[in-house]
Image (cartoon, rainbow, N blue to C red):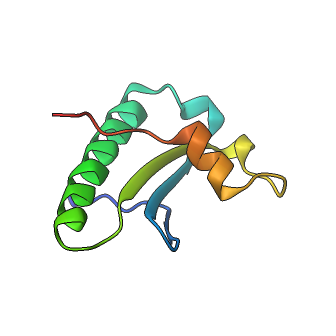
Amino acid sequence: MDDAYEPDFVVETATEKLLCEPKAASEMEDPEVQDKARAAGLWCQRASDHERQHGGKPWRYLLIPHDAVDASRTLAGLVRQFEVPGERR
């Protein structure tokens, strides 16, 4: 079985890279979804550390409930509300 993780969207802006994972609102608190979100947040933290050392852009992970996505939302607003931070060492 292939356990490779593939996010739904990767967004690159002028200043950062975002792993974006829309999920059904009813699944947001599922333990497996939360475990994967923490792992992805940690991956983004480590990728950002690497990028900083090599002149790259930081990474962020967003876990977004499907019903929060609509034409009135901005990417910046989604980042503020749904970023899952990595754990600091």
Q: Quadrant of the N terminus?
A: bottom left
Locate residue 68 relative to residue 71 in the image: left or right.
Answer: left
Locate residue 71 relative to residue 48 in the image: left or right.
Answer: right
Badge count: 0
In the rendered image of this protein, does residue 12 appear above or below residue 32?
A: below
Furthest-right residue in this view: 72
Query: Does the image show residue 59?
Result: yes
Rendered residue at 64%/35% (across/down): 25
Q: Position of residue 69 (x, y in %)?
A: 72, 50
Locate residue 84 relative to residue 38 in the image: left or right.
Answer: right
> Which of 22/74 is in front?
74
Q: Position of residue 57 (x, y in %)?
A: 35, 68
In the rendered image of this protein, does residue 62 appear above or below residue 12?
A: above
Q: Quadrant of the C terminus?
A: top left
Query: Does the image show residue 3?
Result: no
Q: Position of residue 70 (x, y in %)?
A: 79, 53
Q: Position of residue 67 (x, y in %)?
A: 73, 42
Instruction: Give the image quarter of residue 31.
Output: top left
Rendered residue at 38%/40% (across/down): 37
In the rendered image of this protein, does residue 40 appear above or below residue 59?
A: above
Rendered residue at 57%/48% (across/down): 79
Rendered residue at 26%/34% (across/down): 87
